[in-house]
Amino acid sequence: MKRYLQKIKNVFTLKTIYHIYKKPNGSITDSMSPVEIKKIKYRNRRVIGKQRKYYENLAVQPDYSKKYIYVALHCYPEDTIPPMGSIYSNQCFVVDILKQNIPEDWHIYVKENRVQFYPINKHIKPRSRMFYNYIHDNQNVSLVDIRTPQFDLIDNSQAVATLIGTTGWEAVNRGKPAIIFGNAWYRGCEGVFCITSNRDCKNAIDSIVNGYAVEYNKVKKFAYAAEQVCVRAAINPGWARQFDITYDENVRALTSAIQNKLVSEESNV
């Protein structure tokens, strides 16, 4: 009976974390005056600065002699997370399901996304302290210093866990299994375990514990195949500029790709 009561308590705790976690700070809009924008930026710097300091007080330096899974958090809010992360958009669930299935002598290292602490980013909202406390208070789970090099955490891990993040793609390219909880573009790649249930997670971790190894040649083949079917364009115009794609070229490429897809779907009906 006690165990079931604890489960009920955990569900309500997670819901509370999710709602506080979503609470926005001041948001900048186009209709604001320069003075209003300056005030909000100042307040955001203070709020996010305090959050970073709070996080750093809880964070530890990773012990690379341990066997661990590295969890790379997504920043919040991010437009791809709710539709592609499903119930795991509340990333506490990711930590919980991993914790239930790892061996007793394994650890989970959770690292905050550095963008979460960018005070000038008007789209980022601060997480609640309850979110960090919930992760920190779990046995065999630790928050990691934000300055810890990403590739060091990947290379010394047993596996990497993320919703749909680039960290998963980096992991398989560095020979580490990726455990993903969302609809990532690389979900069909060698070395990627797609999780939709507790059973999926258990099977993935059991396979990794038993010595699963990523075959890099298959990763390269996946990358080559992806390149052949991809469109040289970007949904975000800012990304297109990074690859010297003009606005007009980007629009034409996206429009053509959508039209070709629609024609293909109609011919298959």
Image (cartoon, grey):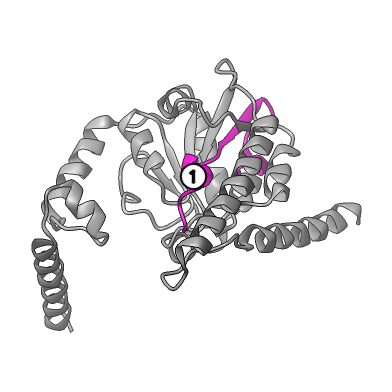
State yes or no: residue 245 in magenta.
Answer: no
Query: Which residue is disc 1 drawn over?
Result: 118
Residue shown at 82% from the left, 58% from the top = 9
In this view of the protein, can residue 226 be seen by the observer? no
Give the quadrant of the N terminus.
Answer: bottom right
Establish if 66 lies above or below 245: above
Amino acid residing under circle 1: Tyr
Which quadrant of the view contains residue 132?
Answer: top right
In the image as oriented, which residue stretches furthest toward the top? 65
Q: Which residues are magenta?
A: 97-122
Which residue occupies the foreground of this view, 241 or 265?
241
In the rendered structure, the answer to whether residue 168 lies left or right of residue 202 reads left
Residue shown at 36% from the left, 38% from the top = 191
Q: Position of residue 205 (x, y in %)?
A: 54, 38
Disc 1 secondary structure class: loop
In the rendered structure, the answer to whether residue 95 lies left or right of residue 162 reads right
State yes or no: residue 111 in magenta.
Answer: yes
Q: Position of residue 120 (x, y in %)?
A: 47, 49
Give the quadrant of the C terminus.
Answer: bottom left
Q: Residues within 10 Å of mark 1 (few under 14, many from 20)?
A: some
Which residue occupies the foreground of this view, 205 or 62?
62
Q: Position of residue 199 (x, y in %)?
A: 57, 51
Residue shown at 91% from the left, 53% from the top = 2
Which quadrant of the view contains residue 12?
Answer: bottom right
Q: Position of residue 95 (x, y in %)?
A: 62, 45
